[in-house]
Image (cartoon, rainbow, N blue to C red):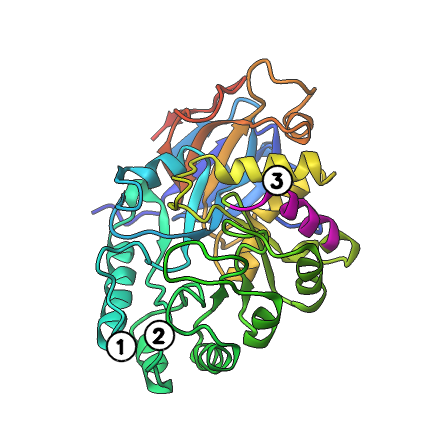
Amino acid sequence: MDASPQKLVIRNIGMILSGKIEAPTLDGDCLIAIDGKIADWGRAKELDTEGATAEVDANGVTLVPGLIDSHVHPVVGDYTPRQQQLHWIDSTLHGGVTTLISAGEVHMPGRPKDIVGLKAMAIASQRWYENFRPSGVKVHAGAPVIEHGLVEQDFKDLADAGIKLLGEVGLGSVKDGKTARQMVGWARKYGIQSTIHTGGPSIPGSGLIDADMVLETGADVVGHINGGHSALPDDQIVCLCENCAKGLEIVHNGNERAAVLTLNTARELKKLDQIILGTDGPAGSGVQPLGILRMVAMLSAFGDVPAEVAFCFATGNTARQRELDTGLIEKGRAADFALMDQAQHAPGKSLLESVRLGNLPGIGMTIIDGHVTSGRSRNTPPAMRLPQVVKG
């Protein structure tokens, strides 16, 4: 096998979005990735572009870190029994999403709730998505839903087996803040990140999780702060924004008005870096392949946020909150990108202005770990310009 470095050169980039909310745009028209990691970017004439094993002509479109969906409910492979749908992950890739984060594999038919069974399913889920990436998409799965009977050793066992996430607190039998806080503490002790359900019940067996329980539990991410589906009253959402120091997750599968309230409150509190985005699908609302793009456009348009900042909610903010090696244009980070342009005939003088007006961009290509994983999107409106592979 050829052991020489694999070098990807992306030329003629019109604009680079960094994913960094403190500096959301970068100067440059070229990016280089070596062996699936970002190596350099800037002006092509100032970079070492020789020896490329693969080359993409961006044709003036915008390069964005691959979008991240912070809240999905996968089951197995690229199939969801929740809506009897195949290839939902591939369809999501065509919405520019290259990484998915599980909030629990709760739609598995017959999901085990005994301790041995739930641990076994979590480990199996983590393994099968580690070993199989649908259409190249990175699925961080194996997120057990906590149940009564778990003890500290169980969390150590899960962590030792590679589990790094808890499913939504509140979707299992543990529904009181005291018990949940103890288990979230055990999870954190062993490096497992937690998310808590917020708002009214979403599926049979779940229940209301109000601001008091969210604060008492102290989970790392306030899952769907805008409800999934039903949001908390305004004063409770404001209270959570004021008192939570980590992820404030807004989802497509929630209340849009509450989403804008969360955004406005976070901005007043200078906490925009805590805003992260998810879809909360597959769910009763179905699968939302363009859900993250729609959230970016909606929050930019109705939340009065520059589009380049709104894209950070779906990239760098989530990467930092979730401790991922993608989502930011930084040397050594995974070379995961979405190349996009203003949609044909959409209003606005540029991609950013068009998104600010609430329009979706057109996805022309996705790249994961330095490899092209999709071309022109079958789901977004057609882009004005398209990148193309010219080598490799």
Which quadrant, please, contains the C terminus? top left
Mark 1, secondary structure of its residue = helix
At x 36% / y 43%, what residue is drawn? 6
At x 70% / y 49%, what residue is drawn? 261
**Mark 3 crowd level (few <14, some 14–19, many ≥20, 10 Å Cα):** many
Residue 259 among magenta residues:
yes
- What's the residue type where badge 1 is placed? Ile
Q: Earlier in the sequence, mark 3 or mark 1?
A: 3
Camera-side residue: 284 or 316? Answer: 284
User: Label 2, on which residue?
Assistant: 147
All told, the count of numbered labels is 3
Q: CA gap, disc 3 to disc 2?
A: 41 Å
User: Can you say whether 287 is above or below 100 in the image?
Assistant: above
The residue stretch that appears in magenta: 254-265
- Tell me whether the residue at label 2 lies in contact with that at label 1, contact meaning CB atoms closer than 8 angstroms: yes
User: Can you say whether 317 is above or below 355 in the image?
Assistant: below
User: Label 3, on which residue?
Assistant: 17
At x 72% / y 55%, what residue is drawn? 266
User: What kind of secondary structure does the magenta stretch mostly adopt?
Assistant: helix
Residue 238 among magenta residues:
no
Image quadrant where residue 121 sits: bottom left
- Tell me whether the residue at label 3 lies in contact with that at label 2, contact meaning CB atoms closer than 8 angstroms: no
Where is residue 102 drawn, in percent x and y? Answer: 39, 56
**Mark 1 crowd level (few <14, some 14–19, many ≥20, 10 Å Cα):** some
User: Label 1, on which residue?
Assistant: 115
Position of 12 compared to 124: left or right?
right
User: Can you say whether 234 is above or below 369 in the image?
Assistant: below
Q: Earlier in the sequence, mark 3 or mark 2?
A: 3
